[in-house]
Image (tube, rainbow, N blue to C red):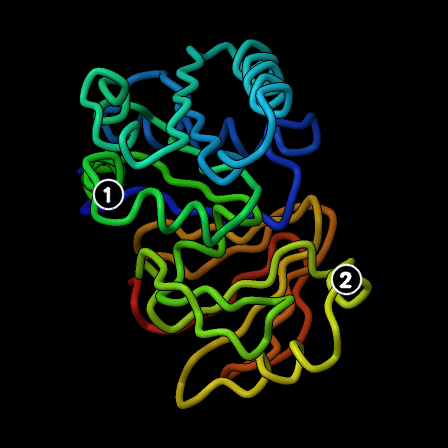
Amino acid sequence: MNEYGSLALVGSGEYLPQMMKLEKELINDGLANNKKPIYVQIPTAAGQESDHRINYWQQLGESAAKNLGFTQSFLPILTRADADNPELLKSISDAALIYLSGGDPHYLANTLRDTLAWDLILKNWQSGGSLSGCSAGAMVLSDQIPHFRLSRSEPTKGFGLLKEVRVIPHFDKFFRWIPDSAAKVLLDLPGDEVLIGIDEDTAVVKRVGKDWQVWGKGKLHILKGKAPGAYQGGEFVKLGSSLK
């Protein structure tokens, strides 16, 4: 069995048809590591949104799981109390894929950090389950999460799986939304830290023993790192040294 499972950072598109092939690959990776055909969907990043939006994510995820032929486990972990409720979290340990969907990355990090939920998610990944984060879900896997719209605010502590990597999702739309001042702060990272942008409907995937591979119709942009540039689907890249 691998020491840890596959890891995917997704720019956008969770549960949509254009990402179905990627989600199937990630589930199959988990199954190969003796996990069960369960697709756990965690909408915590949308926890401050309306019930209507939470229901939207649940229905979208249900459709994705059904089309893939796997069991959906939608876990409405919307507060820290939810994140420490063992009855709500039973499906995490055996799931082939755990997916952190989009919304507010700061709320996601502050809700799951140092909870039973994150402990179980981490142990699942370390024992061979696949872990994927889309947009906010990708950002929280870094060591720190910048405030794009409040560039002078201190970063939020992330989950630290990728200690050297900072993620900008929706990159092909990013500079339409974010002021130049915030972009300059992001580009001025210290030391060996790597800054990447992931286009919409695009992902970068790490499998044990292999470099990161770009997936999807857009590009991965390495804005700061040893090999800056834009990379297309199928290409392999190195992103720091925290994962081998």
**Position of residue 215 in the picture relative to residue 86 (left or right):** right
**Residue at the spot of label 1:** 122
The C terminus, quarter of image? bottom left
Q: Position of residue 7 (x, y in %)?
A: 40, 47
Which three-letter amino acid code belongs to the residue tagged 2? Trp
**Mark 2 Cα-neighbour bin, 10 Å: few <14, some 14–19, many ≥20:** few
Q: Position of residue 177 (x, y in %)?
A: 77, 62
Label tally = 2
Contact (Cβ within 8 Å) of mark 2 with mark 1 = no
Q: Position of residue 227 (x, y in %)?
A: 55, 81
Is residue 235 placed above or below 43 in the rendered structure? below
Q: CA distance from mark 2 to mark 1?
A: 32 Å
> For numbered disc 1, what is the local secondary structure?
helix
**Position of residue 36 in the picture relative to residue 140 (left or right):** left
**Position of residue 171 in the picture relative to residue 206 (left or right):** right
Image-quadrant location for residue 214: bottom right
Which three-letter amino acid code belongs to the residue tagged 1? Leu
Residue at coordinates 36% horizontally, 59% vertically from top-left?
158
**Mark 1 Cα-neighbour bin, 10 Å: few <14, some 14–19, many ≥20:** some
Residue at coordinates 82% horizontally, 64% vertically from top-left?
176
Is residue 214 placed above or below 184 in the rendered structure? above
127 vs 159, nearest the viewer: 159
Residue at coordinates 34% horizontally, 26% vertically from top-left?
96
**Residue extending farthest right:** 176
Give the label on residue 177, or none: 2
> For numbered disc 2, what is the local secondary structure?
helix
Is residue 142 placed above or below 112 in the rendered structure? below
Image-quadrant location for residue 183: bottom right
